[in-house]
Amino acid sequence: MKDGKVTMNHNPVEAFFEKFISLDEDDRIKIRSLFKKVKVKKRQFVVQPNFVATHRNYVVHGAFRSYVVADEGQEHTIAFAIDDWWITDYNSYIFQKPATMFVVALEDSTIMQIDYEKEKELKASHQKFETFFRTIAERGLAFYQRRLISNLTQTAEERYDEFVEKYPLILQRVPQYALASFLGMTTEFLSKIRNKKTNQKS
């Protein structure tokens, strides 16, 4: 790495871009120049309330959790992100307003960051980059809609079963208290569900 910029011939964030758009060598050079590689320690915050989220974060390897804290002190997990996922406080990042949530590393992690102004520069350089960011935004919106519907229509056990089926890798890497708050239940209730599943298998 030189001057905080990734100088390798190929990096993971390029591979993610190529899932949605084609890249030529000039595009690759531009991505490398605008993203920076950052090491994040476990329990380190990359977003905190009342500070503007200046970066969009692509997780090379590691695990993150975004959450809010209610007035009574209860934590509510909004999202997880592991390898090959993105995370930030999107409301803060998109509108450049103070954040309302925390984003914290659940394990030692490596991320690729692009800041707000550099993302604007990347989008302005070619329509394909506008298409890329629009596509991942649409996919994110669809995810949050599915989650909202499941919270409104499914039982706690059904929500857990769906999470286990769709996100087994995340299940292995996030603490139980965080998963419980994501699924909208207490840690104790989640333990009961897991014990029930274990007993059913035995």
Image: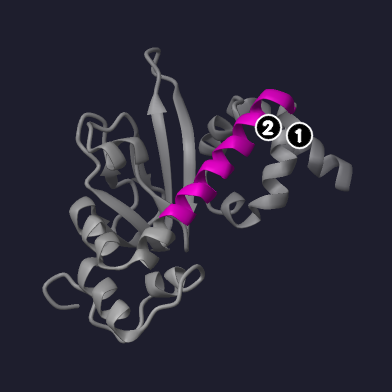
Residue 143 vertical position relative to residue 77 in the rendered view, above or below: below
Circle 1 sits on which residue?
158
Q: Are marks 2 and 1 in contact (CB under 8 Å)?
A: yes
Most distant residue in the top direction? 72
Characterize the magenta stretch by its predominant secondary structure: helix
Element type where label 2 sits in the image: helix
Please provide the residue range marked out in magenta: 134-154
Residue 32 seen in the figure: yes
Image coordinates of residue 162 in percent, x first then y, are 72, 43
Under mark 1, the amino acid is Glu
Out of 192 and 17, give the one closest to the viewer: 17
| Image point (43%, 43%), residue name | 65
Under mark 2, the amino acid is Ser
Circle 2 sits on which residue?
150
Element type where label 1 sits in the image: helix
Out of 131 and 142, give the one closest to the viewer: 131
